[in-house]
Amino acid sequence: MNLVLFSEASPIILLHLMFAVLVIVIGAIQFICNKGTTLHRGLGYVWIIAMLVICLSSFGIKTIMPSGIFGDFSPIHLLSIWVLFQLARGIYFARKHEIARHRKCMVYTYVGGLLIAGAFTLMPGRFLYKVLLAPWI
């Protein structure tokens, strides 16, 4: 593991990473704890705000495809737009007490917006690849 890279990373990448770790942990707790409780709702609000920080900060990370066909953005930024849409839907369904639809939106957001996107962070050349995998390969 190359922790020196954290000192060289931009503040936006560090913010993005810090909140990503937070939402992965909170999301796992949400899957385990009882639904509809005060704890579930409270963690849900924190999770939503943290996901918003992740999505919005992602638009400040433009190192994947600088000056590509999408300007400074890459196709993975479409995932941030999708997550923002799913978050809005999930909140809407929770407020309307359509719990099955709320759950579906939140699970899709967790799996697609965190786990799948997180897997892309381990691609060669990416920050977490350099931190976690490159020293061993």
Image: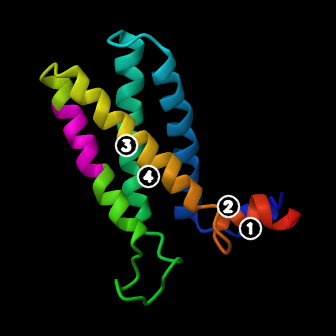
Magenta region, mostly helix, strand or loop?
A: helix
Give the numbered dot on residue 130.
1
Q: Residues within 10 Å of mark 2 (few under 14, many from 20)?
A: many
Query: Residue sitting at 74 percent across and 67 percent down?
Result: 130
From this view, report whether residue 74 is shown above or below residue 56: below
Q: Secondary structure at mark 3?
A: helix
- Give, as a single range, the part of the protein colored magenta: 84-92
Mark earlier in primary sequence (4, 1): 4
Residue 77 within the magenta-colored segment of the rendering? no
Residue at 50% from the left image edge and 52% from the top image edge: 116
Task: Give the residue at mark 2.
Answer: 128
Q: Tell us which disc is closer to us: 1 or 3.
A: 3
Q: Residue at x 20, y 39 (%)?
A: 89
Residue type of the residue flagged with mark 1: Lys
Classed neighbour count for the residue bearing mark 4: other residues with Cα under 10 Å, few (<14), some (14–19), many (≥20): many
* Front-lying residue, 44 or 74: 74
